[in-house]
Image (tube, helix red, strand yellow):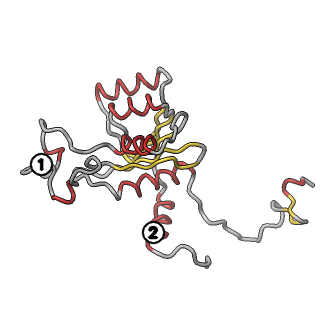
Amino acid sequence: MDLDRQVSGFNVMEDIAPNYQPPIRPSWDEYFLMFAKLAATRSTCLAFPVGAVIVKDRQILATGYNGSPSGSVHCTTQGFCYPGLSSCDASKTLPSRAVHAEANAIAQAAKHGICCAGASIYVTLEPCIYCLKLIISTGIKEVYYEKVFNSGEKAMLRDMFVQEGLVSIKQIHLSEEIAKQGAMFLLNPTSVPRP
């Protein structure tokens, strides 16, 4: 009998209760994407919330969300980005006041002396080209994102960085089952006995 599968006379593979269905668990990608989505709830950007989580060896190193620079009034506090402008994306000429979620996560890691070389980043929105260059320069090797952002020439530059082996990029999603479980855990006490 295989000793790795035997625990004090209990054979894990043969002695599972009949009709037992183990609880569902998110994949590692779903797990970290949920953290990024939770980080996005802290966003102070009126255009759209974005969250990011930097991960290495399945451990969270730093999180970030998009919003005004630290110490500056939040757009969500004042109700506008610029006087007379409801959100930064409503103007073709004025620059966004927001620091992107990826840049904030990298800044938080740097502020606390955390090395991100060889890490992965999970974001709710595909990084813009400027953030992608920052991610690459930081040494982050993998990008996982939920929603597409880049197109045209920006997508071409992104693809060039991938072909050069500077970074890998993959779109991921939460399964409906995991999203429902996550919502249930957020809306109800979690540390209670299972039915």
Q: Who's the residue at 36% across and 40% down the image?
A: 103
Alpha-carbon span between mark 1 and mark 2: 34 Å
> What quarter of the picture does the C terminus occupy?
bottom right
> What quarter of the picture does the N terminus occupy?
bottom right
Q: Nearer the viewer, mark 1 or mark 2?
A: 1
Q: Residues within 10 Å of mark 1 (few under 14, many from 20)?
A: some
- Answer with mark 1 or mark 2, whichever residue precedes in sequence: 1
Q: Say what amino acid the circle numbered 1 marks.
A: Tyr
Q: Residue furthest right?
A: 1
Q: Secondary structure at mark 2?
A: helix
The residue that label 1 is drawn on is 82
Which label was assigned to residue 107? Answer: none
Quick check: 124 above or below 78?
A: above
Q: Is residue 43 left or right of residue 55?
A: left
Residue 32: x and y in percent read 50, 51
Q: Is residue 192 left or right of residue 122?
A: right
Quick check: 123 above or below 156?
A: below
Q: Say what amino acid the circle numbered 2 marks.
A: Leu
Residue 190: x and y in percent read 53, 73
Residue 11: x and y in percent read 86, 62
Q: Who's the residue at 46% across and 55% down the image?
A: 35
Q: Quadrant of residue 78?
A: bottom left
Q: Is residue 5 left or right of residue 51?
A: right
The residue that label 2 is drawn on is 186
Q: Secondary structure at mark 1?
A: loop
- Comparing 150 with 107, the one in front is 107
Q: Quadrant of residue 133?
A: top left
